[in-house]
Amino acid sequence: MITYDHIMVRFGELSTKGKNKKDFINALAINIKNALKEYTDLTFDVRYDHIYIGLNGTDYKPVMDRLTEISGIHALSLVHKCEKDIEVIKEHALELFKLETGKTFKIVTKRSDKAYPLISDQINRLVATHLFKNVPDIKVDVHNPEIELGIEIRAEAAYIFASTVEGAGGYPLGVGGKTMHLLSGGIDSPVAAYLMIKRGIQIECIHYASPPYTQMAVIYKLEDLLKKLNRYQPRIRLHIIPFTKIQEAIYDNAPECYCITIMRRMMYRLAARLAKRRHCPIISSGESLGQVASQTLQSINVINEVTNMPVIRPLACSDKLDIIKISKKIDTYDISIRPYEDCCTIFTPKNPKTQPKLEEVVEYEKKFDYDTLINEALGNIEVKIIDSSGEDLL
Ligand code: ATP
Ligand code: MG
């Protein structure tokens, strides 16, 4: 029986060429094979502009669904692979056409095999004529067809397909290097992490924990969040940094309204140090402009002053409803809204400064030896590896 037997993976328009493109494709192929390893009958044909996945009887639906989550894939089509002989193409196109429903159609041929004896337009016409001869009451509609049959003539074979679905886009994970990502238990930071991963950037996460003010439940929550992100990055390192002593020192030495600003400066000092140690050239976070007192431009300026390492804030200009939409899509929303005590929520001052002054902040920070506290915290990090197998491999 003539049927769809492969999935064609397209990369889209890549700005990368030469060796970069090779690295891109290799990384993508590894990520795809890894994500699909439970489907043991699949075969992979990795080429310069597409990857073809042979189904060999595997149900295409779950495979396609999984592929739409992998960054670096522009589009996916369920395709039928056949010989390039025009008679074979006509016959197989007809059989595949019969599987579709609709009366109006269009044939779109692409010919990357320039040695092929027929040009695209001739192939379109020959196939359309064959359909007219064999299927009653059908009509060509070039603008809005119910059925669009694609034919690609390539060096090794011809591929015929009737539908294309959008992929996740972005770049394959691993090609963009690594970021040190600040992960709270809220809605925003997991979404920001996902957007970084989508760009091909691997994440390592930092969480600042303040026991006994914050509970172990927060850590379980983070593990659950990261397990969701494991679909996009199979192995994520989480650094849990003890933050209690630093927070207490801040509250002992600065007025309440300045505590959040100074606390966030400490977070970035720690993050920059750990990022360097872990070979991450950037830091990222879930901050969104204007959401809370610490996210006004003046606050961000004063907070960011502690490091010259770039801080990427993928959600800087997103509004909350859009962020929530993404968190629902990646299934982190329900975990994020579980009630929990965060180190930020516990010490929330009544009137945090929205326009903190750097000179004042610096004066308060001089009152305690935060360097020693930072070194101590960095020496007591707990590391968890969250792996897609669901296990916690310390
Ligand atoms: P989120 O929903 O991600 O918690 P938020 O809107 O609650 O964000 P804040 O609590 O001000 O905003 O935090 C801003 C960002 O700072 C977070 O998105 C996260 O990147 C980082 N952050 C906050 N608290 C922590 C923490 N305890 N550990 C690590 N990072 C944190
Ligand atoms: Mg928060």
Image: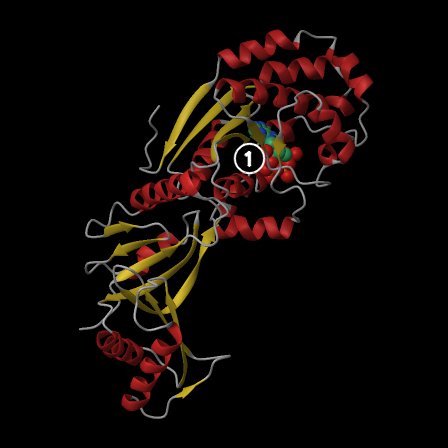
Provide residue 204's location: percent of width, then percent of height. Answer: 47, 29
- Residue occupying the far bottom of the picture: 137
Q: Is residue 291 visible?
A: yes
At 46% from the left and 83% from the top, the residue drawn is: 141
In the image: residue 158, left or right of residue 314: left
Task: Report which quarter residue 102 is drawn in.
Answer: bottom left
Image: 46 above or below 210: below
Please identify the quadrant where the C terminus is shown: top left
In the image: residue 148, left or right of residue 87: right
* Dot 1 amino acid type: Tyr
391 and 110: which one is in front?
Answer: 110
At 33% from the left and 78% from the top, the residue drawn is: 100
Q: Which residue is mark 1?
A: 340
Q: Alpha-carbon neighbours of circle 1 within 10 Å: few (<14), some, or many (≥20)?
A: some
Q: Is mark 1 within 8 Å of ligand 2?
A: no
Please identify the quadrant where the N terminus is shown: bottom left
